[in-house]
Amino acid sequence: MKPYPLNADQWRGWHCDAFPQGSWQVAGDELQAIAGAPRIDLISRQRYRDFVFRFEFSLPQRGNSGVFYRVDEAAELAWHSGPEMQLLDDAHHPDGRQPTTRNGALYALRAAEPATQIEYGRFISGAVSLRGQHVEHWLAGRRVLACALDDPGLREAMRGGKFAGFAGFAQASEGHLVLQHHGEAVRFRRLSIEPVD
């Protein structure tokens, strides 16, 4: 199947029916989080099982955001349910001190290699690929992470870490995509998804 674009019509606010105008704005082909606004994440209207999700993003200095996948909206917050590809200014954000919370990481679980630094105001390409339990994170055209979500060691890390209290974390075989609003002016553009068999 060919990729198809995900414009503003394909997103709504977390636990909302409509696009959250007070927290995000549309500028040309960009989805822009409004700095200092209520932190309402964007959730895809559709659910996806196996796919390649491509996007470009831009972060401000100390910027922090993320892409969650296979999210169940029954959860209180997206991170209670879906794994996250971290998007971060490693050089200036405190999370950059830990490998498992740096740019491109499977947040709090697996580090991304090699490191990918951002340039403020410039867009960088990203992608998440999911096939069954195999996930890959890509930044600037390079694969920076590949692992199996059902790997016993990874499951043990989930049970013993910050996700220990969420029995459904990373359990869904399909779910929503979520773009995180972390309070900073992150920008996304050229979003597309390619469902795969």
Image (tube, helix red, strand yellow):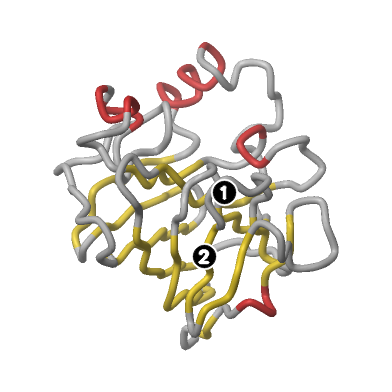
Residue type highlighted by circle 2 = Gln
Residue 160: x, y in percent?
52, 11
**Tag of residue 181:** 1
Instruction: Report helix, strand or loop for mark 1.
Output: loop
Q: Residues within 10 Å of mark 2 (few under 14, many from 20)?
A: many
Where, by quadrant of the figure, is residue 164 drawn? top right
Q: Is residue 96 left or right of residue 170?
A: left
Q: Is residue 23 above or below residue 102?
A: below
Tag 2 secondary structure: strand
Q: Residue furthest top?
A: 160
Q: Is residue 98 left or right of residue 86?
A: left
- Measuring 48% from the left and 75% from the top, which residue is drawn there? 30
Q: Residue at x 53, y 40 (%)?
A: 83
Q: Amino acid at mark 1?
A: His
At x 18%, y 48%, the residue is 117
When the figure is inspected, residue 102 is found, relative to residue 192, above or below; the finding is: above
Q: Residue at x 14, y 43 (%)?
A: 114
* Quadrant assignment, res 12: bottom right
Which of 133/190 is in front?
190
Q: Considering only order in the chain, which callout, 2 or 1, is on the residue closer to the N terminus?
A: 2
x then y, percent, for residue 2: 47, 88
Name the image quarter holding residue 169. Answer: top right
> Could you say where residue 17 lies in the image, as x and y percent from the top left?
85, 64
Q: Nearer the viewer, residue 2 or 132?
A: 2
Q: CA distance from mark 1 to mark 2?
A: 9 Å
In the drawing, does residue 23 fall left or right of residue 50? right
Residue 192 % position (x, y): 48, 77
Per the image, the residue denoted by label 2 is 32
Contact flag, marks 1 and 2 (Cβ < 8 Å): no
Q: How many neighbours does mark 1 have within 10 angstroms: few (below 14), some (14-19), or many (20 or more)?
A: many
